[in-house]
Image: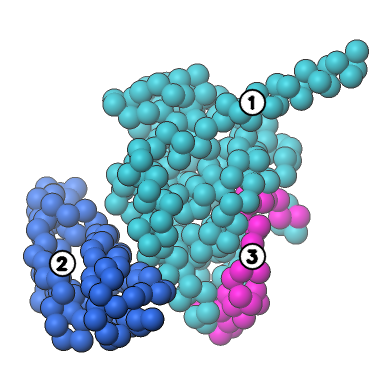
Amino acid sequence: MVRVLINVPKQMTAKEPFDVKVLISHPMESGQRRDQLGQTIPRDIINHFMCTLDGETVLEAEFFPAIAANPFLSFSVVAEKSGTLALTFTDDHGVTQTETAAITLT
Amino acid sequence: MKCLLALIAAAILVIGAGERRSGYDDASPETRAMQDDDAANPAFLWVKQGEALWSEPDGTEGKSCAGCHGDVTSLRGVSARYPAFDSKRGLMVTLEQRINLCRTNHMGAGSFAWDDDKLLSLSTLVGLQSRGMALAAEPREPYLSDGAALFRERMGQLNLSCAECHEDRAGLSLGGSLIPQGHPNGYPEYRLEWQGMGSLYRRLRNCMVGVRAEPYSPDSPEATALAFFLAVRANGMQIETPAVRP
C-alpha cells in the first residue's frame, strides 16, 4: 500500500528508552482542496496508527487532516526484553498495513 | 604583471566561491535538521523505491539497471558531472535524460515522463551516491554560453530574467520567502511546499510559470542548457542530494 521507513537504534539496552522514527509515504489528502474543475478532492488520510511490542500497545494515535503528506513520527519506547515492534496504519479506505522491526537488546 | 593579474583572478574566484550560498545555509534549523537526519528526510522514501527499481528488470530486453551497472554504489561521482555531453549523440544530457536513454537504448523499455515518481526515485538514488562530493560539470560550449544567455534573458508577462532575482536580488525577500542564489546542488530535492520530490526541471518550470512565461518543455535544448549553466555556476559546491527545502 504505502512505503514505510522504520528507524530503530542498532544497539538498545533493557529499560533504557530509545527513539523510534517512522516515515510513511502517503498523500494525506485533507478533503478541503478542490481540483482544477472545482470539485472537492476526497479526503484520503491515514486515520489510525498503532505501535505494539510483542502484542502490547506502546502508542496508539488518531490522525486528522492537518497532518502534511509523508508523515514523520518520532517517539520513545522502553523495552524490557527483545521482541518485535509492529506498526499498524489504517487509511480512509479501511486498508490496514503492518510493518515490523526487530528489537534486539544487548 | 601576468602574475599579478593571475593573483587578482584567483582572488575574484575565491571571493566568488565564498559568497556562494547553498539553500541549506539559509534554511530554518527545523528544515536543516530534516535534511541532516536520513531517518527524518522524507526523500529517503524515494530512495527506498529507487533501490527496489534498481534491480527490477523492465522492458523487452529483460534487463535491470543492476544488470549493467551492478551495485548502485559504483555510480559514486556520476551525478556530480551531470548535465554532461554525450559525444555519441552530440547532445548535452541531464541525469534524468541519461536514465531514460538507458531505458530506451539498453532495456527496451519506454521513457519515463519528466515528473514520473519512478524516474525521480532512480535519479534520487543515483544522486545520493555522490552526496558530499563537489559538483564538477565540465564546461562546454556552446551550451555554457547558451545557458548563461538564457539565465539573463527576460521572459514572461512579468518580464524578469533568472539573474534579476537569483543574482541581483539573492538574499532579499519575495513575499516573505528568501530568494536563494539558485544553485542546483541538492536536486532531486524534497520541497515542503510541494509535499513531495521534484527535479531541477520542476523548479525551473515553477519559476517560469511564476513569471508567467511559457515553460521550456522538459527535453528542450533550452531547459538542458539552463540546467548545465547552473551546474557549472555551482561547480565546487557540495552535493546535498536529496536536500530538503522549504
Q: Which residue is mark 1?
A: B16
Is A81 within the magenta? no
> Which amino acid type is marked by label 2?
Ile
The hue in which chain B appears in the rendered picture of the protein: cyan
Residue placed at 50% from the left, 70% from the top? B110
Residue under numbered circle 2 = A46
Q: Residue at x 49, y 59 (%)?
A: B124
The answer to whether residue A24 is visible is no
Residues rendered magenta in the picture: B58-87
Host chain of mark 2: A
- Could you tell me which residue is drawn at 63 percent across and 46 percent down? B135
Residue B68 is tagged as: none
- Identify which amino acid the numbered label 3 is placed on: Leu
Vertical position of residue B77 compared to residue B61: above or below = above
Tag 2 and tag 3 share a subunit: no
> What is the x, y in percent for residue B21?
52, 32
Quadrant for residue B196, please give it: bottom left
Q: Position of residue B191 (x, y in %)?
A: 36, 47
What letter labels the chain drawn in blue?
A
Rendered position, B25 above or below B11? below
The Cα–Cα distance between marks 1 and 2, rounded to whole angstroms, is 48 Å
Q: Position of residue B121 (x, y in %)?
A: 45, 64
Q: Could you tell me residue B1's position as x and y percent?
A: 91, 13
Chain letter of mark 3 equals B
Q: Nearer the viewer, residue B24 or B213?
A: B24
Quarter of image, res B115:
bottom left
Up-down: is B5 above or below A41? above
Query: Circle 1 marks a residue in which chain?
Result: B
Q: Is residue B33 left or right of residue B89?
A: left
Residue placed most toward the observer, A22 or A81: A81
Is disc 2 in contact with disc 3, using a CB cutoff of under 8 Å?
A: no
